[in-house]
Image: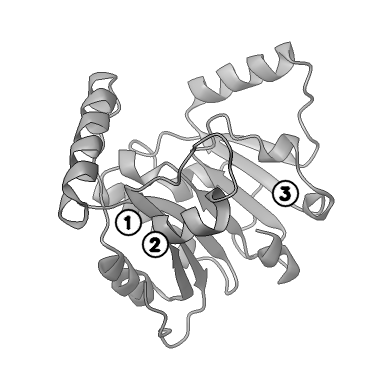
Amino acid sequence: MAQAVERGVRQCVILGAGFDTFAYRQPGWARSLRIYEVDHRATQEDKRQRLQSAAIPIPANLEFVAIDFELVSLREGLQTSTLNFSEPAFFSCLGVLLYLTREAAGAVFQMVAAFPKSSEIVFSFSLPESSLSGIDAEHRAALANRAGSLGEPWQTYFEPQTLLRDLRALGFSKISFLSSEAAEQKYFQSRSDGLQAPRLGGICSAVVSHREPCSEKP
């Protein structure tokens, strides 16, 4: 996001924001951003009550946008906000796509791809069972069963090579992947609490170019 701001991006959309705290601890370079938290209305109401109870003020550059991804298209929902569709935007979509249908997830990519050049989406995704080791596949199955029992079934998985192809076709470039192994080496090695990088998926970044497809590999 900081790199997007350096490119001149001044809009940040956090999809499925949940209890994300970026807007309430934003660094100085984010003050020029207009931040949009997108999620179900009930989740947003719960969050706002918790913020109020903790005496945490709502930042002046934050706007809540209530959307049910499966009932209303992302574009339709965002059109009710002050988001400027003619200006570049940065989209954060972490821990969201797994719970959407493939059609709904594809609609997210299509909508972002329609934004002006230099817009970007960073999203997490889960790998299909065929891409996991036996132990990881068993662990994933247990987690998926638990999520399903709570009414939040896991629905959509992505294979990096397929993602790369589909994102290129939509007009994205500078597509990069952060694997579990790379995340472990870069962010988790010095931890003293034993926490490890998630092994069941990855994170992808893709910038809108509307030019010839790039040559990055996952």
Q: Quadrant of residue 24?
A: top right
* Disc 3, SS: strand
Q: Are marks 2 and 3 in contact (CB under 8 Å)?
A: no
Give the percent coordinates (x, y) of residue 100: 31, 42
What is the CA distance from the residue labelled 3 to the residue labelled 1?
Answer: 25 Å
Q: What residue is disc 1 on? A: 106
Q: Are marks 1 and 2 in contact (CB under 8 Å)?
A: yes
Residue shown at 65%/65% (left/top)?
87
Give the percent coordinates (x, y) of residue 37: 60, 39
N-term-proximal mark, 2 vs 3? 3
Is 122 situated above or below 19?
below
| Residue 115 falls left or right of residue 56 | left
Task: State the residue in front, 99 or 178.
Answer: 178
In the orientation shown, which residue stands out farthest toward the bottom?
Answer: 212
Task: State the residue in front, 175 or 120.
Answer: 175
Query: Given the image, on which type of amino acid does mark 3 rest?
Result: Arg
* Disc 2, SS: helix
Disc on res. 110: 2
In the orientation shown, which residue stands out farthest toward the top?
Answer: 53
Is 122 situated above or below 196?
below
Q: What residue is disc 3 on? A: 34
What is the CA distance from the residue labelled 1 to the residue labelled 2?
Answer: 6 Å
Give the percent coordinates (x, y) of residue 140: 24, 38
Q: Quadrant of residue 68?
A: top left
Is 38 situated above or below 107?
above
Q: Quadrant of the C terminus?
A: bottom left
N-term-proximal mark, 3 vs 1? 3
Q: Quadrant of the N terminus?
A: bottom right
